Amino acid sequence: MIQSLTPRQITDIVQGQLLGPSEDALISMVSIDSRSILQPESTLFVALKGAKFDGHTFVPSLLDLGVSCFLVKNDFPDAASISHRASFILVDNTHTALHQLAAYQRSLFKNPLVGITGSNGKTIVKEWLGQVLGRKFPVAKSPKSYNSQVGVPLSVFGIHATDKAAIMEAGISKQGEMSKLEAILKPEIGIFTNIGTAHEEGFPSMEDKLKEKALLFDHSKFVICRKEHAAIHQHLLDKLGEERLIVWSDDVGCDYTLTVRKDPDHAKILLMRPDLSIFTFSVPFLDEASLENIRHVIVASLTLGLEPTDIQEGISHLKAVEMRLTLKPGINDCLLIDDTYNNDLAGLRLALDFMSAQRPKDRKVVILSDMLQVGKPQEVYQKIAELLQYHRVDFLVAVGQHIRQALSHFQGESRHFADTKSLVAGISDLNFENDLILITGAREFRFEQVVDRLQQRIHGTTLEINLNALTHNYNFYKSKILPHTKIMVMVKAFAYGGGAAEIANHLQQMGADYLAVAYTDEGVALREAGIKLPIMVLNPVQESFIHLQQFHLEPVVYGLDFFKQLGKYCRHQGTDMHIHLDFDTGMHRLGFEMEHLQDLKTLIIDFPELRIASMYTHLVGADEEAHHDFSIRQLEDFLKMCSTLESALSYRPLRHALNSAGIVRYPEYQMDMVRLGIGLYGVEVSGLYEGHLKPISSLKTTVSQVKHLKAGETIGYSRKGKMDQDGQIATIAIGYADGYDRRFSNGRGFVLIHGHRAPVIGNVCMDMTMLDVTGLEVREGDEVLIYGPGISLKELAERIGTIPYELLTNISSRVKRVYYLD
């Protein structure tokens, strides 16, 4: 809150009646959730009543917790009898009072407030704008997608006096809602993203919905919109006049012209301002939705006074925005895209874009329900069919009564089911095998049943991979190198346990230059999964030469004999092959040494079939300052070896030496390419930028059973665990066969349940582990975090005397991998 208030002041603002103490407490926080009150003595609890809950029922327990002030309905029967324990503010309607209090707090904020509305993109524009502005000054913004009648006031309470700007999104589902939000927010600057089919059932027409949304800007000084959204532009022009509009377009003639040019791995946006000055932005997006959203961000940032160079800096550091798209392994080698509970045409577009970015399967399948919040179903379902055709969907599974209208326009194979129950019963008849399946539908269709039926049944334990966190880490390291420096990403050992095919595909989408695997069969698997990037094989053997040739893989050559064997093979086959030379400058594992270079020169001349793609070396101790001098000596020796060998070549191969730690410690030696490994997966081993990376994986399992034991009872094999007092143990569904190291036994390891640490008790078993959960109120089926946000891999590794690499790569293949964008 911008200003703390006494119960008496709050009572005056909401025009209520005060019972109990009036001045004892100073309120600085507002809560509607009894589970999230951190400082009860300074929190106002607002008892809201909804269709399935009544906040008044939590008042007794919150009194015991120490909450000192409550906003309740004036017919709350217990207020008078318990008012000696806390302040009670009685009002006719607690929702209205919540709005009044938020409006008062908003009136205290004198800096710009940006209000965002539209059918899609509100949250993304808000988050990206917040990130861009946040690099220059403190910014308040709505958490997640808090844009409702309750979410907006709660967002306002998050504004602080020190914030230089606030960014709030406002969403509505029916008429009469926006004027209430406008009374709270009163944005100086507005952004109208677009208009679509979401919540259309709450409005007589699309025009009525547009008018309702535009009410947010009744008192705005400026409103930003895109001219290509003609209905929005015309309505705002009629409503506000030309002076209050800031219009951008792909074409000249508006306040800002923002023209897009797409390259293979990014896009450039050419900005022309009213004074005819020009600036080019580089953005890491290619899909149309993101390109529109980022242009709204650019215009809003310019309106708020940022220079284009500052905006570009912010764009270069954009973080992931929460989305509800999850990749999961399915039955019969299928891959599922879980987009359940999305029920909007624009959302379907995004999901289909995401689908198109995945590695190819035999068929593209979409399982889609009725869209329940559309005003003109015939038009919407025709557009759905057009979208499916555009994205080359092979098979549509339609569920519901109204979606039949889409089938008449869809030219591919299709099946119709009246309801989800019928679909689940008939799934086996659909013969899904090696298909890419998008599952998306309205909440009431409960498509989670479909996902559950189609998921691969491997194991109850899952490794969740956050693809947006991976993107964040990749971009962090990319920001540390020069624009021309290439990136080779290490996806050996099943991508450090994360699952090579999906991670490699994501890296391919991000524009990585090279991949590296340990063995030839790993490279073959990536090629069979549709990966096109160049792939370096670190440990090839003679038996794999035919596969190297067949799948266009590039082997590392580390010895004279191996060079000769490979050269003869290529000559006999009448083929050429790209190879990589490993120079030993101090690792003393594999590789050519300086004394071998003269003979190597001769072999290079003798076997022109082998083209040197790159030369590289391994740094021994780049992660530790203690080895600085040795690392520099390695790097200088490597450069000398490269120069010596290049005298025998008519071309210049790529040079690379830096691993993840080397990228941050020795940027002056980045040369032509760097090799990104453990850093991509969220572990910054040098310790210099640990807070800048995000863990990409979370290993989770569930509680199988909870037991009550007496003091002195023993647990597990060899009776190694022993209860010091009466308490509880929980058995979880993970053991050393899953990769949970046996060295975590007997208290060395711990997990998180409900955010609390629970130590391992007894020995880790093959398939199960026991925990001491005394006092944690753990139940069967509760989620257990083995590692991820909240549990550092570094800490776990240090507890058992190993390194994070080992923990990551030891995760068994029987553990199901799930990929998601958050």
Image (cartoon, rainbow, N blue to C red):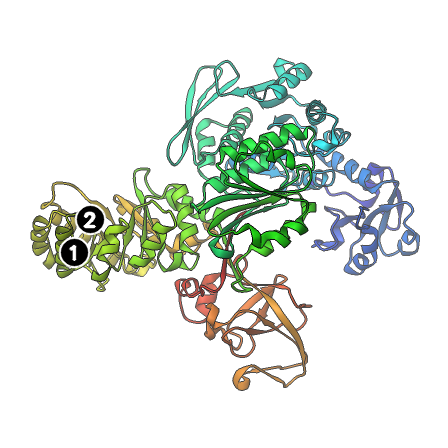
Is residue 534 or residue 457 the one in the foreground? 457
Q: Is residue 747 shown above or below 171? A: below
**Callout 2 secondary element:** strand
Q: Tell me which residue sits at (49%, 75%) in the image.
A: 766
Q: Position of residue 531 (x, y in %)?
A: 36, 47
Q: Do the CB atoms of the residues marked 1 and 2 lie less than 8 Å apart? A: yes
The residue at which mark 2 appears reads as: 577
Q: Residue at x 67, y 23 (%)?
A: 220
Reply above or below: 423 against 350.
Answer: below
Residue 802 pos. (x, y %): 40, 68
| Kind of residue at disc 1 | Leu
The N terminus, quarter of image? top right
State which tag comes first along the sequence, 1 or 2: 1
Give me the residue at 53% from left, 65% from top: 459
Question: Considering only vertical position in the picture, is 817 above or below 253?
Answer: below
Side of 105 where 629 appears, left or right: left
- Disc marking residue 566: 1
Q: Nearer the viewer, residue 80 or 589?
A: 589
